[in-house]
Image (tube, rainbow, N blue to C red):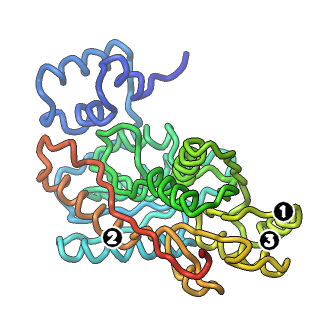
Amino acid sequence: MNQVKIYDVAGAAGVSLATVSRVLNHPEKVKPATRERIEKIIKELGYKPNLNAKGLASSKSTTVAIMVPELTRSSVAEMINGIADCARRRGYLLRLFVNNNRGQEAPIESEKELWGDVIASGVDGVLYINDELTNEHLELIMEASVDVVLTNTICNDPGVPSVSIDYVKAAYDITKEMIARGNKKIWMITSIRKYMVNDLKVQGYNKAMQEAGLEPKVIPVSGKTELNEATYREILSEGYPEVAIVVRDSMAVSFINIARTLGIRIPDQLQVIGFQNTRYAVLSRPKLTCINTPIYELGEAAMNLLTNLMEEKMGEDVENLQQLIDYNIVWRETTK
């Protein structure tokens, strides 16, 4: 018999994951009638929350956990800077938890162990930075006995607190703009590894291309530069588009370097656009046009939202649990 999940309870009760989570962890915040109905369904289904996600601490520690899958990306460091500055102003300390589970056969088991460590540490809340969000990850998040804010990731459930940019709209807007400039052959280069934010970018790109009656071409490549170079060389030796939209700056710069070694002129023959606006964009030759993702501001806003949740300043204002930060396009030398 399959184990009952929090999704099953939410579906049977006709409520969001967040409402079930509040019944489990903060029942006093749920209307009595709703709480009683959900508690009855929990009993009927035999749902048992994950014990690793349950904490017994009753006193406030004024400490927040930052959970990240890895520290190799420059964007994570910049995001943590924003988190740290806001935490300092709001009077909170930070603890960093890194889940180095890449390549493991059962990464979700490693994630469960990490959640156990986080809750046992007695933190008041968690900032969760992981754009490889799966239903299993969400299950652990919703069962946590402390407030959790997804950072740079959005969940389909509007009751799950998150701070991000609208990646679908960002990719749609830049694709639409390049089409308006007369380009028809536009590629999207994404990662083989499944990242939620990259999937959202592909979704926006596909929408713009289909609306214009153009054939989308999505090319998945490795996130590792040394592997990408051989792939890019193979792709470009067979032809190239008018525009390549690349999901990360570092991947875009590598793409530009290979194109130039093959004698392709940037931007005269091939225009390239990246995402993030990291230091790679400015150091690139020519300098990279990109969607500016305000990473520092994302971290700052996520910490601010989490603090308001922990200090119960949100009340019933669930409409503001998912916050979108403004982005802009930085035009540089890789576009005409």
Q: Secondary structure at mark 2?
A: helix
Q: Please identify the residue farthest to the top as the structure is shown.
A: 44
User: What residue sits right under mark 3 in the picture?
Assistant: 229
Q: Amino acid at mark 3?
A: Glu
Residue at position x 39%, y 58% in the image: 165
Residue at position x 47%, y 70% in the image: 76
Compared to 249, does 123 lie above or below? above
In the figure, is residue 20 to the left or right of 176? left
Residue 195 in percent (x, y) is at 57, 52
In the figure, is residue 233 to the left or right of 28? right
Residue 110 in percent (x, y) is at 56, 50
**Residue 239: numbered disc:** 1
Residue 159 in percent (x, y) is at 29, 39
- Give the Cα distance between marks 1 and 2: 39 Å
Crowdedness of circle 1 by 10 Å Cα count: few (<14), some, many (20+)? few
- Give the Cα distance between marks 1 and 3: 15 Å
Place residue 328 in its image quadrant: bottom left
- Give the Cα distance between marks 3 and 2: 32 Å
Q: Between 288 and 159, which is closer to the camera in this rendering?
A: 288
Residue at position x 65%, y 46% in the image: 214
User: What residue sits right under mark 2 in the picture?
Assistant: 297
